[in-house]
Image (cartoon, rainbow, N blue to C red):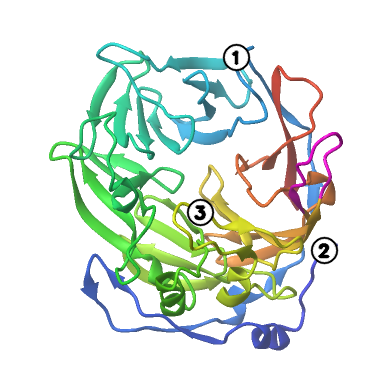
Amino acid sequence: MIKLFLDIQTFLKLTSCVLVVSLTACGKSEKTPEIIFDKAQTAFIPTKLVQQEDKVFALDSLTNFISLEGKLANINQREVFHFMNYENPKIYFYDYETGQRLNTIILKKEGPHMVQIPSIMTDYFVHNMDSVFISTNLLNRALYLVNQGSEVLFKTGFGHKIGSRNPNIWKEKALHFTDYSTYRQGVLTSGIRVAIPEPDQQNPLRTHFDLATERFENLFLEEAKIVPHYKELQELMRQKQSVNIQKFVVGNGDTVFASSQISDSIYEFQKGTFIKAHYAANPAITTADYKTFNERASIESEPGSVNKITKDQQPPYFLTMFMDVEKKWIYRILLHHTSRKKIPGSDFEPIIVDEASVIAFNVERKKSYVVDLPKELHLYLTVKGVFANKNGIHFPVKDQELENEKRYNVYQLN
């Protein structure tokens, strides 16, 4: 059902009219700004989702369509669909318009150009067809730069021998390519994460990594600036009673937009300096606060244990945030309602999303559009491999019949 919000005064009451945010950039203190949400920026425009023709890419026999997480990039004025096959390490490139495969980078398993890829926790960033960065974030943490001929042009273990087991790996910085990344004049700018951050430390979300010096030259955009009630969450972390809240970063050039799973706003930055907060949520749905979000999972404090999501009904929060390839729109998917789904012949009962909405934020007009997502998409709590361009939002089809293709349902906002 299409959401149409005409009473702006009521809408403003549902949201915070004034939000005070303390922000710093690159370690320098700034005056705390007062952020006012005005009608022109918070008015929601009536819209609808129109299903388009499915987009399909042919796969080889070595690629599993289920685990494939496709991405879309604009490379030399051409939209390129790409993905990594982690089980049989290769990176595939396709022309989006024609569906024709352009190139395949085969990552070598031995020799001077070997790239050690663990089965999980590996990110990659395509700067262009001849420069692909790969970051491994497990026990053998490393960064590689490979070209289209599968040659390793650069590699580093961040002060450790590549392939060695580092007992302090979980407390060290790791590049995070699922966030917005750029590469200019030997400097890689990307997301950065620490698996187990210290509770009393400010945790930056962005970094400049200089390949020549192999050093993190700058850390900026602290997560405290985009996560509501950050101090309270830090206290829960000290008590080992806090679950992780995912942060999202997208951007274009020096402009970066950041948010989190429980933030109703998108925060805009220019070269690390805060510019403005833009409301980008669904005013008909109350997004979970940090306490409600924290209660969605059981907290295990024993050494070696993990947090388990136990509640069938999850509170409303944002599953993902991504930007279209033209850099004109930012999309957020907001969970409304969930339930358990029984898999025939299996004990596995995943939590599925029964109801959700997409919030589309127009970067130029600074206006948001909201519409319910079709239930037949069958989203899970982990939303990966969703991307967008002028044709619409591409959702991977989970129950496709053919195994030799990757199929996407495409929905366009009108």
Q: Nearer the viewer, mark 3 or mark 2?
A: 3
Dot 1 corresponds to which residue? 62
Tell me which amino acid carries mark 1: Leu
Q: Earlier in the sequence, mark 3 or mark 2?
A: 2
Quadrant placement of the N terminus: bottom right
Mark 2–mark 1 CB contact (< 8 Å): no
Q: Position of residue 253 (x, y in %)?
A: 37, 50
Label whose residue precedes the other's in the sequence (2 or 1): 2
- Name the one closer to the observer, 36 or 197: 197
> Residue 57 vs residue 117: left or right?
right
Q: Give the magenta range.
A: 341-352
Residue 267 relative to residue 376: left or right: left
Give the residue drawn at x 56%, y 74%: 290
Amino acid type, mark 2: Ile
Alpha carbon separation for disc pair 2 and 1: 41 Å
Q: Residue at x 31, y 46 (%)?
A: 169
In the figure, residue 300 lies in which quadrant? bottom right
Residue type of the residue flagged with mark 3: Ser
